[in-house]
């Protein structure tokens, strides 16, 4: 983001930059589907990009999501909808009509093969015959289509919603199978930009001692050859992003030329974050750490404060309800997010402090690789399934996770923002935590018991269970934060809860391997009687 002056000047200085916005699954297709449905990934069950587990576009269709998601809801309310760019993994020249992506008044979809080929892309306008754009840069073509779509949208004189989704700065995957294009290819004007840039050497970058849990503890220290290549990848990504920054300025300019800039909401975000060398990882995504889940989010629009930075917690599941609110449309049922009050101006809506984080399957070839001639060598890592919980407030900030190996992580991110000191390292049973450990003024095991119960709710939550998870534990409504829950009166209640666990590491969301899925509700009586309540779907 520091290399995107147009985004900062045109959007950030005229809107709000959110520094605590999260995707709830750091994987492209699951995250996009979550954004457009307002549902957590465990409720869409689009958990990956390939069949049979996550499934990408085919799974999006078979789950029935193509019949019930944001563009359809907007069209029902009289809003025209448009899309330019990558829609979903697996959306290809062989299936884009089987059936077409529903709900778009106009579209120009970037199709496989060629989605990640910077110089040879494939497009279909309004689901017509697909067209190859040979030896033309993907950013140029995406920008061209986006500007044309704005002209089309404005000419109809109706409220409109437009998504522009370039597949940049994703690593290059050449449609012809030529692996030499792994590094993103910049436009010629940026070919030599940022010559001295290096991956920021934060404390979690290629640490001398391993960090994290599960397979991360076995990752080797990266040698200088790999470090040099990671730095070159970083520079190539910056060069590609520079082209996106120009695209943003052209889109803003087009809106201004049509005289509608000040009456248009403009949002800049990403589907997931990215790690390059953090925690000894190579390059990629799919982990629950801050580098992968805390993503760019800038919002400019009528009524939105200008030039502000907000630390209010928000997630991609909040976008669909927020769009519905701004268009004055009725809220749909069973949305797992809620409106963003900084944007909507709702003074009676309190921002959440929690984010659920989840992922199933393996770490892909971009995670733990050595390079050979700029091409990743596959490294199989199967146990990359986990459930996580991120909590942010004014006086505490933490990340808690349970892996499919039943290893646990807890980071006090006030003291340890780079997540290097796992307070639960070598812990598979959270009832057996050292008596000397404390957190937030309480014995660590009592704090973790609260976190685990909250994660138990969130890992299968639906609708209001996701936005008000403490209410599922305390139906009286007097507990709304972790600080509230740490009252000593609740110690026995939380110690008695079932614990989040897995019985096996699987490649997809298979409920029978995900351990308990229920919590007890606090009865409110002095005798500490509890009642059992399921929170699964």
Image: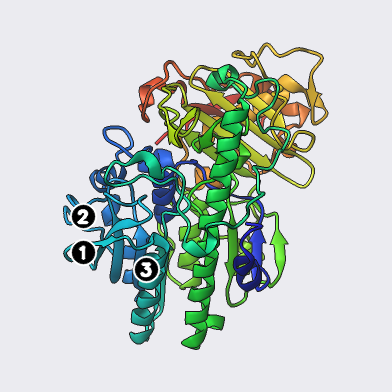
In this rendering, position of residue 326 left or right of residue 334: right
Q: Which mark is residue 96?
A: 2
Q: Residues within 10 Å of mark 3 (few under 14, many from 20)?
A: many
In this rendering, position of residue 37 left or right of residue 314: left
Instruction: Report, in whole angstroms, how far the alpha carbon at label 2 lies from the one at label 3.
Output: 22 Å
Task: Tell me the residue that label 1 is attached to.
Answer: 127
Q: Earlier in the sequence, mark 2 or mark 3?
A: 3
Between 298 and 334, the one lying in front of the other is 298
Residue 165: x and y in percent read 41, 60
| Residue 126 occupies quadrant | bottom left
Q: Residues within 10 Å of mark 1 (few under 14, many from 20)?
A: some
Relative to 353, does residue 441 appear above or below in the rendering? above
Task: Tell me the residue that label 3 is attached to.
Answer: 74
Instruction: Report, in whole angstroms, how far the alpha carbon at label 1 lies from the one at label 2.
Output: 7 Å
| Residue 161 occupies quadrant | bottom left
Residue 192: x and y in percent read 57, 56
Instruction: Report, in whole angstroms, how far the alpha carbon at label 3 lies from the one at label 1.
Output: 20 Å
| Residue 42 occupies quadrant | top left
Residue 522: x and y in percent read 62, 31
Circle 1: element type: loop
């Amino acid at each position: 983001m520091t290399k995107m002056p147009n985004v900062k000047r045109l959007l950030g200085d005229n809107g709000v930059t959110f520094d605590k916005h999260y995707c709830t699954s750091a994987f492209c297709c699951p995250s996009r589907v979550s954004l457009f449905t307002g549902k957590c990934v465990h409720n869409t069950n689009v958990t990956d990009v390939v069949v049979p587990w996550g499934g990408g576009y085919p799974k999006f269709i078979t789950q029935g999501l193509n019949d019930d998601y944001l563009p359809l809801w907007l069209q029902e309310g009289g809003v025209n909808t448009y899309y330019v760019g990558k829609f979903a993994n697996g959306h290809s020249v062989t299936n884009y009509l089987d059936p077409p992506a529903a709900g778009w008044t106009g579209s120009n979809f970037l199709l496989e093969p060629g989605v990640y080929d910077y110089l040879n892309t494939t497009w279909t306008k309004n689901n017509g015959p697909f067209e190859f754009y040979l030896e033309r840069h993907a950013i140029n073509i995406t920008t061209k289509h986006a500007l044309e779509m704005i002209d089309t949208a404005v000419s109809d004189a109706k409220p409109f919603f437009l998504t522009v989704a370039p597949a940049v700065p994703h690593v290059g995957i050449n449609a012809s199978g030529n692996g030499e294009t792994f590094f993103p290819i910049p436009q010629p004007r940026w070919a030599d930009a940022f010559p001295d840039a290096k991956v920021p050497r934060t404390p979690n970058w290629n640490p001398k001692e391993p960090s994290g849990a599960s397979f991360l503890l076995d990752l080797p220290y990266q040698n200088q050859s790999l470090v040099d290549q990671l730095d070159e990848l970083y520079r190539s990504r910056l060069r590609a992003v520079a082209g996106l920054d120009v695209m943003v300025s052209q889109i803003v300019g087009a809106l201004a030329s049509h005289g509608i800039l000040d009456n248009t909401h403009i949002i800049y975000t990403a589907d997931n974050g990215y790690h390059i060398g953090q925690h000894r990882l190579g390059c990629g995504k799919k982990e629950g750490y801050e580098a992968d889940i805390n993503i760019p989010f800038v919002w400019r629009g009528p009524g939105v404060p200008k030039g502000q930075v907000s630390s209010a917690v928000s997630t991609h599941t909040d976008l669909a309800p927020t769009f519905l609110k701004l268009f004055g449309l009725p809220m749909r049922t069973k949305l797992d997010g809620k409106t963003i009050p900084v944007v909507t101006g709702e003074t009676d809506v309190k921002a959440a402090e929690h984010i659920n984080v989840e992922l199933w399957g393996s770490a892909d070839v971009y995670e733990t690789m050595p390079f050979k001639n700029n091409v990743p060598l596959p490294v199989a890592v199967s146990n990359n399934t986990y459930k996580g919980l991120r909590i942010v407030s004014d006086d505490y900030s933490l990340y808690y996770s349970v892996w499919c190996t039943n290893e646990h992580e807890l980071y006090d991110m006030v003291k340890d923002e780079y997540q290097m000191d796992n307070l639960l390292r070598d812990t598979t049973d959270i009832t057996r935590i050292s008596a000397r450990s404390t957190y937030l003024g309480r014995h660590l095991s009592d704090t973790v018991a609260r976190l685990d119960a909250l994660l138990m709710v969130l890992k299968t939550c639906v609708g209001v269970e996701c936005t008000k998870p403490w209410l599922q534990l305390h139906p009286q409504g007097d507990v709304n934060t972790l600080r509230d829950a740490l009252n000593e009166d609740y110690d026995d209640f939380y110690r008695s809860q079932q614990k989040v666990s897995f019985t096996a590491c699987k490649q997809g969301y298979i409920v029978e391997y995900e351990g308990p899925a229920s919590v007890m509700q606090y009865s409110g009586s002095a005798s500490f009687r509890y009642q059992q309540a399921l929170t699964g779907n």
